[in-house]
Every structure is written in C-alpha cells, then in structure tokens.
Image: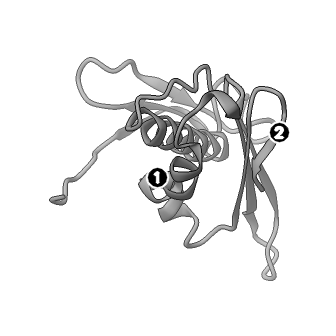
Amino acid sequence: MSEKTITVELRQRSNYQFDIEFNEGIPQLMSDEPAPLGEGKGPSPVQMLAASVGNCLSDSLFFALAKFKQKPEPIHTTVNAMVGRNAEGRMRVLHIEAKIHLGVEASKLEHLDRALEQFQEFCTVTQSVGQGIPIHIRVMDATGLILID
C-alpha cells in the first residue's frame, strides 16, 4: 500500500477547548480537558486516543470476520486507558485495556480462529500506539466466553 498523509486541523476555541476539523463532509469535533484544567465539554485527548484504539480494533475484527462472510455484529468495545505518572513524574498513558464483545456466540461464526489470529495485524492505530504503550486485548463472544485474553 502506498503512503498517504492524514491531516486534521485544530483551532483553539478557548483555553483548553479546540475545534478539530477533519476533511470536508465530516462533522467538526470539539475537545476539552477535564476539570480543573478545562471544562470537560468535549472528549479529552486521552479519551480520543482510547476511542481510536478501540475503534480500530473493532473495525479490524469486523473486517477479518467479514472477509469470511461472517456477521459478528453488533460489536461492543470498552477501552480503559490507565493514566499515571512515569518515572520522571510526568502524566502519561501507562497502559490500555480493550475488551471487545462480539454480538453473537462464537459457535455461530465460521473461521473465527483464523480471524482472531490475524485481526490485530490489520489495526493501524493499535499497532502504532502499541509500540509505545502496552495494550491488552480481550475478545469475548455474546455469552461472555473469552476467546482472546
């Protein structure tokens, strides 16, 4: 695949609030830091990072199963980003946990084992972020059966 550049623009609205502009046709998003820095009127950068990891993982698992003409939906993903101080005392995202819940039982999905083996490799964001932040991924079916841990 050839390289491409993805561009977003941020324009400060007030203090820690920024309007984030994507390309034409995509609604603008406002970010904000939670109190006491900001007012918490929009997602914080850490929340957007967690959402990006979870969204990419969910898309990648859906893609891996859709290649085999399987219907795992509705997929529900919960992402926890643990924020704390590093060795230098700076606030950092120390670890990310993603829990992906398939919308159906594992027994109803053909080639599930193959999809589970490869879906993480399709995830551009998680593979990139994971080079600097540990990411733990758990996948469960609709009954709560753990497929990956």
Q: Position of residue 126 (x, y in %)?
A: 53, 56
Q: SS at mark 1?
A: loop
Along the horizontal axis of the image, is 104 left or right of 30? right
Cα gap from disc 1 to disc 2, whole angstroms = 23 Å
Residue type beneath disc 2: Leu
Q: Position of residue 14 (x, y in %)?
A: 55, 31
Q: Residue at x 58, y 66 (%)?
A: 130
Quadrant, the N terminus: bottom left
| Up-down relation of residue 66 to residue 146 (above or below) | above
**Which color mode does the image show?**
one colour
Along the horizontal axis of the image, is 127 left or right of 3? right
Q: Residue at x 51, y 23 (%)?
A: 71
Q: Residue at x 65, y 39 (%)?
A: 44
> Closest to the observer: 94 or 60?
60
Judging by the rendered image, the residue that carries numbered circle 2 is 145
Q: Is residue 76 visible?
A: no
Q: SS at mark 2?
A: loop
Q: Position of residue 142 (x, y in %)?
A: 76, 26
Judging by the rendered image, the residue that carries numbered circle 1 is 123
| Up-down relation of residue 21 to residue 128 (above or below) | above
How crowded pointer 1 is (Cα within 10 Å; few <14, some 14-19, many 20+) is rated as many
Quadrant, the C terminus: bottom right
Q: Position of residue 59 (x, y in %)?
A: 48, 37
> Closest to the observer: 40 or 53?
53
Q: Residue at x 41, y 22 (%)?
A: 28
Residue type beneath disc 1: Cys
How crowded pointer 2 is (Cα within 10 Å; few <14, some 14-19, many 20+) is rated as few
> Closest to the observer: 83 or 143?
143
- Report the residue that reaches farthest toward the bottom: 87
Image quadrant in which you'd find residue 82: bottom right
